[in-house]
Image: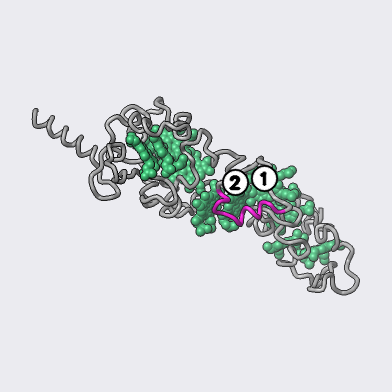
Amino acid sequence: MKLLIQAVFIAALLLMAVPSAHGQDAEYSRKGADTCIACHGDAEIMTLFHTKHGAPSNSQGPFGDGQLQCEACHGPGGAHAGRVRRGQERPSVIRFVADSATPVEEQNGMCLACHQNDVGFSWHTGAHPGDEIGCADCHDLHASADAVRQTSTQPDVCFTCHQMQRSETRKAFSHPIFEGKMDCMGCHNMHGDNAATQLARLNVNDTCQQCHAEKRGPYLWEHAPVSEDCGLCHAPHGSNHPGMLTKRAPLLCQSCHSQSGHPSIPQDAGGLAGGSPSQFLLGQSCTNCHSQVHGSNHPSGSRLMR
Ligand code: HEC
Ligand code: HEC
Ligand code: HEC
Ligand code: HEC
Ligand code: HEC
Ligand code: HEC
Ligand code: HEC
Ligand code: HEC
Ligand code: HEC
Ligand code: HEC
């Protein structure tokens, strides 16, 4: 019996002493957060207690009963919290910032220790390279409101890295992202089942049809590219052409359709060619006649004209 107790005691000690990033054994502080707060009681750190992570009622969270509190994320801080001799450097804990001494994968590992089931699996198949992008590149865990999870502030978090999408969403015709009415998660999903495409639904069309259900059909007369991929004609992040089109009609239509034997007049580099362009090609262009570009349910709508 005595031996057993001893073994348990030793096992517990071993658990408390895990190898740190620097190779030597590191220990957890004795009093947990109380120790840390003695030096880190500033408001911007304490806001953690306004989040789910800081709630003791969250038994699986860092402040649940028997959990490691601050050190659940920052790693063993016994040496860091201890006395430091004059002239000596304070041993570091895990930092979640760009110049951190801890590799990104290891930082993420601290989070995935608890978030393997809800996030971990999709994280490893997702487009964000897990050894380059940290959870903390998007999530601000000490803030009472995590910017990346608020519609009005989320795009700015993404734009720190995705500059191109910033300029696209500022074009004349775009989704109401800058108005704060929609965020990137309207179409994307960072942690869901479709992590490989990072889209909210399985493919582009399913994603768009969440909100544009009327474009789902079924149509009596389908327009092939519409059922294939909305992105063949629309720039999802924004465009300078009305309707967020990738090109203006007729160029858009003519990228797939030849105009030979057709009432329409083609356009060449000099503009509308032939000297007497059909007036129908101006303004709404091809859609003057073919108004049902997404498909038609009219019995005689085979040419998408009604
Ligand atoms: C005796 C005071 C003291 C205690 C106790 C203390 N820290 Fe620190 N901590 C500091 C100082 C001073 C710095 C700044 C170190 C530097 O700039 O080199 C710091 C820096 C940090 C940083 C920034 C990263 C770094 O290493 O520079 C983190 C994160 C941190 N502490 C977390 C903790 C946690 C978690 C605990 C509890 C386990 C804790 N601290 C306990 C004094 C303390
Ligand atoms: C759920 C994980 C988590 C917990 C728990 C946590 N932190 Fe943090 N901490 C982070 C992350 C991530 C950052 C990086 C900045 C951010 O996201 O807010 C950070 C940043 C910090 C910083 C600034 C470090 C720097 O590099 O400038 C300090 C200091 C700090 N934490 C101390 C603490 C203390 C003290 C506690 C306990 C009261 C604590 N943290 C609990 C995740 C956590
Ligand atoms: C000790 C376990 C633990 C650790 C470590 C941990 N979390 Fe959590 N986290 C939780 C729990 C529990 C919740 C609450 C889940 C719920 O109530 O739905 C949570 C919630 C969250 C949420 C959602 C918060 C909300 O308000 O809904 C985010 C985002 C999150 N964690 C990210 C992280 C990141 C990033 C890290 C690493 C820096 C991390 N977590 C580390 C246990 C943990
Ligand atoms: C590219 C930005 C980004 C990165 C990187 C990221 N997240 Fe998230 N995370 C989000 C967004 C956005 C949401 C909100 C999802 C929503 O509103 O539907 C979220 C939500 C969450 C939630 C809440 C529960 C859920 O599934 O909605 C948890 C927990 C979470 N993230 C943990 C993590 C962890 C752990 C990591 C690192 C392995 C991580 N996140 C990396 C953007 C990110
Ligand atoms: C810290 C930088 C960073 C942040 C912040 C970030 N990303 Fe990314 N993102 C990347 C990197 C790096 C890739 C990998 C592909 C690449 O190199 O472009 C990527 C890939 C993607 C992809 C897939 C690209 C493809 O080619 O398939 C999508 C979609 C995406 N991010 C959306 C988002 C959204 C939405 C947010 C905000 C919630 C966000 N990202 C925040 C850096 C970031
Ligand atoms: C209206 C839907 C929608 C919204 C809103 C949206 N995206 Fe996208 N995004 C898409 C589609 C569709 C793709 C192309 C995916 C494909 O073809 O596989 C894409 C692709 C991307 C890519 C990969 C690069 C590329 O252009 O192919 C990144 C990065 C990206 N989006 C970031 C963002 C960011 C950041 C936001 C928020 C500001 C955002 N997206 C909002 C639909 C959207
Ligand atoms: C989360 C909902 C949502 C999703 C998903 C969505 N949209 Fe939209 N879409 C909107 C809203 C809101 C508007 C603006 C309507 C308005 O201003 O009246 C809009 C407007 C548009 C417009 C008209 C723009 C204009 O200038 O008239 C087009 C085209 C469009 N969306 C295409 C798409 C495509 C393509 C996708 C998929 C890549 C998509 N949408 C996904 C909500 C969504
Ligand atoms: C063959 C090219 C093409 C494809 C593919 C396409 N569209 Fe369009 N879409 C157009 C054109 C052209 C307009 C402008 C119509 C106009 O001027 O009235 C438009 C307009 C729109 C509008 C705004 C006006 C309206 O009719 O509500 C929405 C929303 C829209 N499309 C959604 C979608 C969705 C969702 C998909 C995929 C299911 C899709 N489109 C596929 C060509 C296309
Ligand atoms: C990405 C390629 C693509 C684009 C862009 C495109 N189409 Fe089509 N369109 C097709 C395909 C493929 C068919 C089916 C042809 C078939 O069944 O023989 C089709 C069919 C049609 C038909 C019906 C033809 C028939 O035989 O009944 C009309 C009308 C039409 N498109 C008009 C347009 C107009 C107007 C535009 C521009 C707004 C446009 N298309 C843009 C690929 C495209
Ligand atoms: C003045 C009205 C009008 C305009 C403008 C117009 N079309 Fe047509 N289109 C028609 C009619 C009428 C037919 C049916 C012709 C037939 O059955 O012989 C047709 C047929 C088609 C077909 C079916 C294939 C074929 O040749 O029979 C396609 C594809 C098509 N148009 C594409 C376009 C494109 C692309 C544009 C713009 C460059 C365009 N149309 C502009 C009236 C128009």
Residue tagged 2 = 155
On residue 287, the disc is none
Q: Amino acid at mark 1?
A: Phe
Beta carbon at label 2 within 8 Å of ligand 6:
yes
Q: Return the residue nearer the eye: 49 or 110.
A: 49
Asked if residue 292 shows in the view, the reply is no
Where are the magenta residues, as a range? 158-171
Image quadrant holding the N terminus, namely top left
The crowd level at tag 2 (other Cα within 10 Å; few <14, some 14-19, many 20+) is many
- Residue 272's image quarter? bottom right
The crowd level at tag 1 (other Cα within 10 Å; few <14, some 14-19, many 20+) is some
At 20% from the left edge and 39% from the top edge, which residue is drawn?
14
User: What is the x, y in percent for residue 164?
Assistant: 61, 57
- Residue 229's image quarter? bottom right
Q: Are marks 2 and 1 in contact (CB under 8 Å)?
A: yes
Q: Return the residue nearer the eye: 131 or 254.
A: 131
Residue tagged 1 = 178
